[in-house]
Image: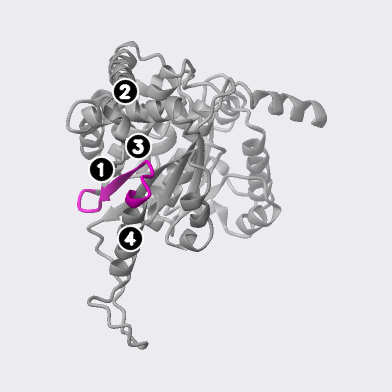
Amino acid sequence: MKINSFNFSKNRTTFYKNNLRKCSEIFKNLLNDKENFFFNTLSEEYQKSLFLKKVVLKKKLHKNILIVGMGGSVLGSKMLSSFFGLDKNYYFLDNLNNFTVDDFIKKDLSKFSIFIISKSGKTLETLTNCNIILNNLKKRKKNISKNFIIISERNSILFNFARKNNLLFFEHNINLSGRYSVLSEAGLLMFNLDYKKINQGINSVIKKDLKINLIKNAATLLTLIKKSKIDTHVSLIYSHNLLSYGYWHQQLLAESIGKKGKDFTPIISECPKDHHSIMQLYLDGKRNKFFTFFKTINNKIDQPIKDYFNQKFRKNSLNNIIDAQFNATINVFKKNLMPFRVILIDKKRPIQSFISLLVYSMLETAILCKALDLNPFNQPAVEAIKKETYSILS
């Protein structure tokens, strides 16, 4: 993972230097205090123990995997599946949609391993989809004990259901927020990823080369938010397999920072498609946005292009055209003095590079929250909707 930052003219001010010291101190305190179980998932011991669980589980998994959950319980695994190109065997139910559910119950779900993931064990949408799947399997007189894997807190509705029906159960730590759970059982248990490479990715952020960059970038963002009234983060995504990362990061920012009237609204732009729609607003609208360019490099797949239109480009391939659009946009942003950075994910070292990005994103968000006097790990406002929904249904 490589990060390049541009156009941060305020980095030499006293205000920025104070923010730099503040973010550095917050980073140290976060790693030392470990107020959320997320920080335990960054340890080599935890990742090794999780790997051993995966070794046992691997023998019992079907070729096809269905993951049922909402928000942080499913966005992490969905992101990993997309980035590593596993979409053909991994399926997701992460909303209430009659058409999507109908498609799934037409399949022979007895040939699927079905992960039901809910931290609380009582997420309404997750239990609803699970009920429909269970009803389908019961009608076909299938033995569900060979298909279901439950990940939830102990003594929850799902925990009791797993125990009653002799289902595989893995504990979701009660002190682990869903959006920070991607490196736990909820995010990694269903994938056969090398835990040593995962540890290398983690350590590159908390111990090695990306550590200083993380603190500097957090201080820069804090300066922009407070001094320049930046209240929107736009992810410009130029590689399709990073799009699911954009949705995971969107939840991470929105639920962590969107509190007490404070804001860092996340917007996802799939590029170069959005060059032809919302880019006009980015370049000529309000200057309240910070931009991050995301792109993979060293891709093995590249579609050659035979020119039937006599455009006379020096090199013709899909990657070359995307690269040209990517670099052209950066050049225009520089000329317009727009605040942005570039994050490149190296496909030669995909596990280490992508895990670095995830750890970097979570730590940067937590540092910003603490600097803004916010709790990074709760989401109190949305609980009101849950209570109101249950009140209506009752």
Query: Left or right: 81 with respect to 94?
Result: left
Residue 177 spot, x, y in % from top left: 48, 25
In this rendering, the label closer to the viewer, 3 or 2 = 2
> Tag 4 or tag 3, which sits nearer the N-term?
4
Verify CB contact (< 8 Å) between mark 3 and mark 4. no
What span is in magenta? 334-349
> Tag 2 or tag 3, which sits nearer the N-term?
2
Amino acid type, label 2: Tyr
> Tag 4 or tag 2, which sits nearer the N-term?
2
| Tag 2 residue | 16
| Tag 4 residue | 328
In this rendering, the label closer to the viewer, 1 or 4 = 4
Residue 4 image label: 1
Q: Picture quarter containing residue 290?
A: top left
In this rendering, the label closer to the viewer, 3 or 4 = 4
| Tag 3 residue | 358
Amino acid type, label 4: Ala
Q: What is the distance, in whole Å, between disc 3 and disc 4 at their CAs?
A: 27 Å
